[in-house]
Amino acid sequence: MTARNVATLKSCTSLLAISQNSSIIIEEGEGASCKVYCSVCRAAFGLQGKFDHGRVMESSREFCRGFRVESTELLSSETQRRKFYSIRRKIVDHLLGASSSGDAHIQAVLDFKNKTEEQSRVQKVAVSHVSAALACIKMKSAGVNYENIIALLAGLGVDVGTLQHSR
């Protein structure tokens, strides 16, 4: 998170503005309350929170499961200024990794980036394997030449994965 993003979040005057400028999501709840949670942490750690040596980290648990906020606090910071400022401070601390439990959000962002990089690599490998299989089928020699084509692709520098591709 850059200093510009932090300045934008600190200048927000409502929780709705904070949710528009960050990964914080606001869901309508029962009655006059809403649920506030971090979508990045929820996706990375799941609903139970990330385990750190058998303990659930407090920040990830709170922002994964979400916490309840009265709907009056969403619209204006003028009515309940102290409550709003404490919630905003909690959110900014979570996004910066400055909360009491450490860098749970930063770890979630890194996990999310690693997962997206891994998914893109998996897709590229699958495309190269399917194209090799289609080439073998067109040559009507799928049982004989598939491994050879995979070896040729690997020799040309195409990412064919790290699994052993022999029979």
Image (spheres, rainbow, N blue to C red):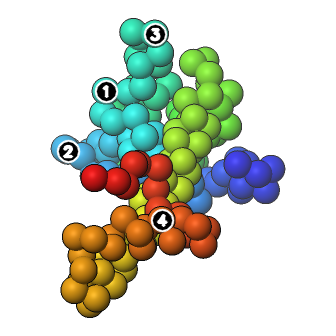
Mark 2, residues whose alpha carbon is within 10 Å: few (<14), some, or many (≥20)? Answer: few
Where does label 3 land, which residue?
53
Where does label 2 land, which residue?
31
Are the residues at dot 4 and dot 1 in contact (C-beta closer than 8 Å)? no
Q: Give the label on residue 48, or none.
A: 1
User: Rounded to the nearest whole Å, what is the CA distance between mark 2 and mark 4?
Assistant: 62 Å
Residue at x-position 39% and y-position 9%: 54
Q: Give the label on residue 151, or none.
A: 4
The three-letter code of the residue at mark 2 reads Gly
Q: Earlier in the sequence, mark 1 or mark 2?
A: 2
Give the structural element (helix, strand or loop) at label 3: loop
Give the structural element (helix, strand or loop) at label 2: loop
Mark 4 against mark 3, which lies toward the viewer?
4
Q: In the rendered view, would you say 13 is above or below 68?
A: below
The three-letter code of the residue at mark 4 reads Ala
Q: Position of residue 19 (x, y in %)?
A: 50, 55
Q: Position of residue 119 (x, y in %)?
A: 43, 58
Mark 3, residues whose alpha carbon is within 10 Å: few (<14), some, or many (≥20)? Answer: few
Depth check: 6 or 157 in front? 157
Q: Earlier in the sequence, mark 4 or mark 3?
A: 3
Figure quadrant of residue 68? top left
Give the structural element (helix, strand or loop) at label 4: helix
Report whether residue 17 is seen. Answer: no
Q: In the rendered view, would you say 54 is above or below 82?
A: above
Mark 2 against mark 4, which lies toward the viewer?
4
